[in-house]
Amino acid sequence: MLNLAPNISDPDGFYEELIRAHEGLDKAQSDALDARLILTLANHIGDRALLSQAIAAAK
């Protein structure tokens, strides 16, 4: 089951790191970084049903 409750220790720090990762990138580079991050995390999760739940929740 997909966990939608807050579950990141130091969420502000994570958000700041994510924003910093995009600094100096143009739109296409920023979009590509997001896509690589999504695919990396999806691979880590690995559970196809869980990934489908995440897609539905994000919509």
Image (cartoon, helix red, strand yellow):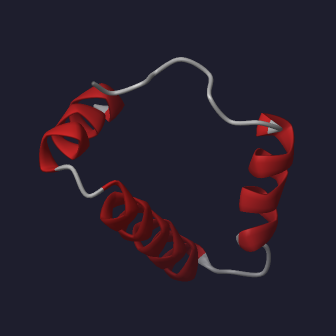
Provide residue 24's location: percent of width, then percent of height. 78, 81
Q: Is residue 2 above or below residue 35?
A: above
Q: Nearer the viewer, residue 49 or 33?
A: 49
Q: Quadrant of the C terminus?
A: top left
Provide residue 58's location: percent of width, then percent of height. 34, 33
Drawn side of residue 2 relative to residue 16, left or right:
left
Drawn side of residue 55 relative to residue 58, left or right:
left
Q: Quadrant of residue 9?
A: top right
Residue at the spot x=39%, y=63% of the render? 44
Provide residue 38's location: percent of width, then percent of height. 41, 61
Residue at the spot x=49%, y=66% of the render? 34
Provide residue 31's location: percent of width, then percent of height. 48, 70
Drawn side of residue 2 relative to residue 22, left or right:
left
Residue at the spot x=30%, y=36% of the render? 54
Q: Quadrant of the N terminus?
A: top left
Q: Residue furthest top?
A: 5
**Number of dots carrying numbers:** 0
Q: Nearer the viewer, residue 47 or 18?
A: 47
Residue at the spot x=57%, y=73% of the render? 30
Q: Is residue 35 above or below residue 52?
A: below
